[in-house]
Image (cartoon, rainbow, N blue to C red):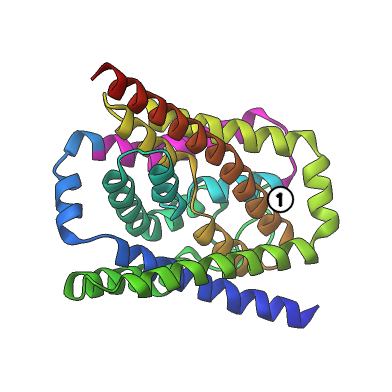
């Protein structure tokens, strides 16, 4: 068991670094500048991810009775934005890939800075026990979490952008990193599942946990969709960027800052699987809908 836990920690760090480096290699400065010029859409996306969704998550926790580990894991994953799967699903759904990728990049940078703030607001920053509201407090101070996110999360992504702008033909490197990150994610998720089977069984069998996961993903996605402007392509892209929370950061914080509370990592993993399934179905549905519209348009033409 100790060997598995060490393997999980190493695989998690490698997963985060490889994922962030591949993200950096997928965007360039021209794309970033073009999307950033759309101030209205960017403002809506940022407000949805860093203000509205954390507040909605807090309201859900206050309204629906749940145990401490579930509420802690749910709040943690809800405040982490900028998931790498957002652009991937946007590509599948034939949406605005440039918007999804650039928004994900901006969200990733700000997540490293804003997530520690929300952790301080929700959980406090001192001690290892539950705070006055009954939520588990992280074993590390928010300042240490910020440093970890900058080193493991922000630096590799910025390095990827610099490499992409100087050597834009490094497509093979990006592909290898994407495959490596996928394998490492599977390894981490498998170890978390193997070492917490009883807790996962309770979570899966617990109606409240499943309902919260499903409802919150739908709410977050709906917020992004209706804030995504007038075009379907931008609506769908922002829906993916809001519904799919950043499991890489959430899992990193859960395993390192809530190391004495393994159930928190379990909640993050199960929530991540739920959002992948729900938004994966939406990506498939929208891709079929887009293909149908293209066929109709070609027939009319």
Q: Which region of the structure is painted magenta?
A: 42-69
In percent of width and height, residue 225 lies at 39, 29
Residue 148 or 82: which is nearer the viewer?
82
Residue 86, compared with residue 47, is above or below; it is: below
What is the residue that sits farthest to the top in this orientation?
Answer: 300
Quadrant in the rendering for residue 275: top right
Q: Position of residue 236 (x, y in %)?
A: 38, 33
Q: Residue 160: which quarter of the image?
A: bottom left
Q: Is residue 68 magenta?
A: yes
Q: Circle 1 is placed at which residue position?
A: 69
Which residue does the image show at 37% across and 57% down from the upper left?
A: 108
What secondary structure do most residues of the magenta stretch adopt? helix
Horizontal side of residue 51 vs 249, given as left or right: left
At 65% across and 54% down in the image, what residue appears? 269
Using the image, determine if residue 182 lies above or below residue 298. Answer: below
> Would residue 275 be visible to someone looking at this image?
yes
Check the image and report above or below for 169 versus 45: below
What residue is at 20 percent from the left and 53 percent from the top? 32
Q: Quadrant of the C terminus?
A: top left
Observer able to see residue 148: no
Q: Horizontally, is 263 left or right of 252 in the view?
A: right
């Amino acid at each position: 068991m100790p060997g598995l836990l060490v393997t999980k920690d190493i695989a998690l760090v490698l997963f985060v670094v490889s994922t962030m480096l591949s993200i950096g290699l997928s965007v360039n400065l021209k794309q970033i500048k073009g999307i950033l010029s759309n101030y209205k859409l960017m403002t809506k996306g940022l407000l949805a991810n860093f203000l509205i969704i954390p507040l909605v998550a807090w309201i859900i926790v206050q309204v629906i009775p749940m145990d401490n580990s579930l509420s802690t894991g749910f709040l943690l994953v809800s405040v982490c934005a900028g998931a790498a799967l957002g652009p991937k699903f946007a590509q599948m759904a034939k949406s605005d890939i440039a918007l999804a990728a650039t928004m994900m990049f901006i969200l990733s940078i700000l997540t490293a800075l804003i997530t520690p703030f929300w952790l301080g607001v929700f959980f406090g920053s001192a001690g290892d026990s539950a705070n006055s509201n009954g939520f588990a407090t992280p074993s590390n101070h928010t300042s240490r979490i910020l440093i970890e996110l900058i080193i493991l999360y922000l630096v590799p992504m910025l390095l990827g952008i610099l490499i992409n702008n100087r050597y834009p033909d490094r497509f093979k490197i990006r592909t290898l990193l994407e495959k490596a990150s996928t394998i490492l994610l599977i390894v981490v998720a498998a170890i978390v599942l193997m070492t917490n089977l009883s807790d996962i069984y309770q979570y899966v069998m617990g109606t409240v946990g499943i309902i919260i996961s499903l409802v919150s993903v739908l709410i977050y996605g709906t917020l992004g969709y209706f804030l995504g402007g007038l075009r379907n392509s931008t609506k769908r892209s922002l829906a993916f960027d809001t519904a799919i929370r950043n499991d890489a950061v959430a899992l990193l914080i859960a395993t390192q800052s809530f190391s004495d509370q393994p159930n928190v990592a379990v909640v993050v993993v199960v929530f991540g699987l739920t959002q992948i399934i729900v938004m994966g179905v939406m990506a498939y549905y929208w891709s079929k809908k887009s293909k149908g519209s293209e066929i109709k348009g070609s027939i009319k033409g």
